Amino acid sequence: MTAWIFTNTPLHYFIQSFWRDEAVSYLIAKRSVWDILILSARDFAPPLYYLLLHVWLKLFGAGELALRSFSYLAFALLGYLFYLFLTEIFKIKTKWAYVYLLLYLLNPFLNYYAFETRMYLLFAFFASLSFYFLYQFRPIKYFAAALLGLLTHYFMFLVIIAQVVYVLTARSYKDRDKLFQLKTILKPVLIFTPWLIFFFTQHKFEGRFWIEKPDFKTFLEIPAIMYTGYERALGFYQNLLLPLSLLLIFLIIYGVWKITRKKYTVSTKEKRDLLYLLLSWSFVPALLTYLISFVYPIFLPRYLIFSGVGIILLLVFLLEQIDKKMRWIFFAVLLVLTLHYSQLQVYSRTKAPVNRAVKEIKAQMKPGDLLFVTNELNFHPAEYYLNERQVFIYGRTYAEIPQYVGKIIIPKDKIATTLPLYPNKAFILKDDLTYDIQSNF
């Protein structure tokens, strides 16, 4: 039974090998606080996640399960916040709130990153928390949540833009309230400015990302992408993405129509403002990123994971506005599609088993032997599973290594150009994770 659970459910992600980005998280977080600040300024993410992970690994160790559990803690906190949205803001009865909570707990986008040693779930939590406090008009708590979000991921700026759009479109705010809210939104940005200055003085901005430019089909698929976290490189589910997106678009249009056709009262005004919040949260960052990507490709679902939370909440909110019979038909269809995609993802979205290859090599190594990787994508995972001093990159120049693979923690002396002299051996790990054993004589 245990074996089935860890191979047929999202817990499968818990026991997979670390991939490059997860290994980078660990290799940065294990350093001193000052080193973390310097390295994160030279990389593509602010320092908060690495600083918290630094404390976490000191408390719970550096094992895969221990490190990934930090993201799962963020997933649990975000789940509680989701529940608060349902009960406190949507005013849904507790028993139905638990039913809707299934859409969060089973969501494939959030499930995947809940088991990954990266900052995405923590970022989604702080971003969602900032929306929660903004809507409730709690400026001090909003300030804290927004600043923590900025210190976790730079895409928090898109969250703030979405929140500005919401404040400008909300009908229940008086002009002075709008001005107060806009000032509230601006404060964490101003406090974050010193880090931005430090970032720009440290970062070299070399090379380009590997992300591809989007096409028009991607535009039509944005609702489904934000719901499932689908990425082009995955391949699976590609043919079902557009039908899912059309279903979500229909549900959104139908729900919006049900709200806007009602007589304008205090109650409907509040519902419309909540609708503007959820629409801004779900789509403003995604659409902005989509448009920017025609100039500089940055449209990658994981950077927009907070919009995944927003669109689930939007769907729940709209389901509550339609006829009960239609509501449960839509909910059932959505739940079935969610489970179907999640199951496909469990079977299809697997990380390369670098751990298995490196552990096999480690069992054969003797003092003085080295591990050479021919693909820099395997360098950091190999460092995680083996002593860092024994791992090198072979067959590549330092200039050929792209910045986004964690180059900031690859010293130039980690580029090997010659093999060790016999009796010492080099285990050469190839792209397909097979290996040769060679020496110079």
Image (cartoon, rainbow, N blue to C red):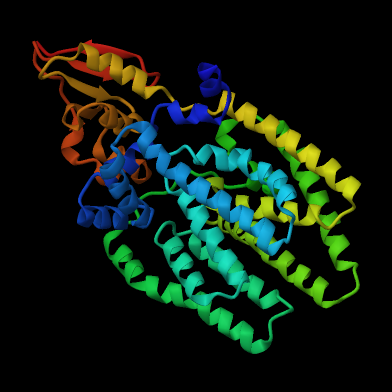
Residue 374, position as x, y percentages in the image: 30, 25
Using the rendered image of the protein, determine whether residue 305 is visible from the camera's viewpoint.
no
Q: How many marks?
A: 0
Q: Is residue 268 left or right of residue 104?
A: right
Using the rendered image of the protein, determine whether residue 407 is visible from the camera's viewpoint.
yes
Image quarter (top left, top right, bottom left or bottom right) of the C terminus:
top left
Q: Is residue 375 above or below residue 80?
A: above
Q: Is residue 296 left or right of residue 148?
A: right
Residue lying furthest bottom: 176
6 and 247: which is toward the camera: 6
Residue at 49% x, 77% y: name it: 186
Residue at 50% x, 65% y: name it: 157
Image quarter (top left, top right, bottom left or bottom right) of the N terminus:
top right
Residue 150, position as x, y percentages in the image: 43, 63
104 and 146: which is toward the camera: 104
437 and 186: which is toward the camera: 186
Residue 37, position as x, y percentages in the image: 26, 57
Q: Is residue 28 above or below residue 274?
A: above
Q: Is residue 320 left or right of residue 285?
A: right
Q: Is residue 260 left or right of residue 21?
A: right
53 and 257: which is toward the camera: 53
Q: Is residue 286 above or below residue 139?
A: above
Residue 82, position as x, y percentages in the image: 61, 53
Q: Residue 276's image quarter?
A: bottom right
Residue at 29% x, 36% y: name it: 62
